[in-house]
Amino acid sequence: MKPFTFYDIYYAPIKEMDDRQADKFFRMICDFLDGKQVTIDAERDEEISPEFELYWESILSDLEAYRSSAGKSCGLDKRYKHFPFLPFYRKAFAYLSYDEGGAFVKMIGAYMFENKAPTKADGNAFKYFNICKRKLDESKARMQNGAKGGRPKKLKILPHECRVPEKYDTSARKENGNHS
């Protein structure tokens, strides 16, 4: 498992699907980016609706561009919001059932692209989201810094006008008769 860039164009269709379809869609994205052959057979798979097929076709050219770039910049980063989908998240996703996997990806997408933290829910998807949240927060901070033009500048601490006390001229005191 390698990290890949998760774009908001992947999340847009996923959030419109039910959890089971979202799981299947995301698994197809992962398989495609891993170099596996991905085909849609609507006749044999009842989960594939016409909308599902259209959603897949809407992102396929971008997936191909990303896959052929071998992880290097292919121009998608400039056009779409994105964050790195780490192997840690994919591992958590792999542990979940089909229904929970879709819910997990929706939670991550909503958190990263819509700033919506999921509400407390029963089930493993919410538990796994909370485990991944710290890493997601790091990615979110990087996204926000990138939107501002890069890493935040360190505040320069202006040196106080520190004057080094000059040595007093003691010879003047001695001439006046002051011996202290």
Image (cartoon, grey):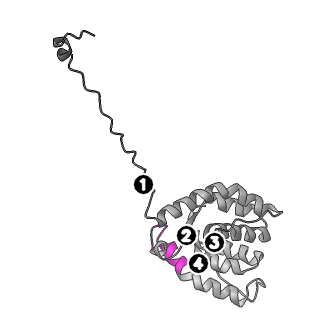
Dot 3 alpha-carbon crowd within 10 angstroms: few under 14, some 14 to 19, many 20 or more:
few
Q: Secondary structure at mark 2?
A: strand
Disc 3 + disc 1, Cβ < 8 Å: no
Which residue position holds label 4? 9
Q: CA distance from mark 2 to mark 3?
A: 12 Å
Q: CA distance from mark 1 to mark 4?
A: 31 Å
Which residue position holds label 3? 114
Of labels 3 and 1, earlier in sequence is 3
Badge nearest the viewer, 2 or 3: 3
Residue 69 shown in magenta: yes
Q: Amino acid at mark 3?
A: Glu
Of labels 2 and 3, earlier in sequence is 2
Q: Which stretch did the figure color magenta?
A: 62-74
Residue 7 shown in magenta: no
Which residue position holds label 1? 153
Disc 2 + disc 1, Cβ < 8 Å: no
Q: Position of residue 100 (x, y in %)?
A: 78, 68
**Residue at 57% from the left image edge and 62% from the top image edge:** 140
**Residue at 60% from the left image edge and 74% from the top image edge:** 32
Instruction: Count numbered badges in the picture.
Output: 4
Which residue position holds label 2? 82
> Up-down: is 53 above or below 118?
below
Residue found farthest to the right: 122
Q: Amino acid at mark 4?
A: Ile
Badge nearest the viewer, 3 or 4: 3
> Up-down: is 171 above or below 147?
above
Q: CA distance from mark 3 to mark 4?
A: 13 Å
Q: Where on the picture, by quarter, is residue 129?
A: bottom right
Q: Amino acid at mark 2?
A: His
Whether residue 148 sits left or right of residue 17 in the image: it is left
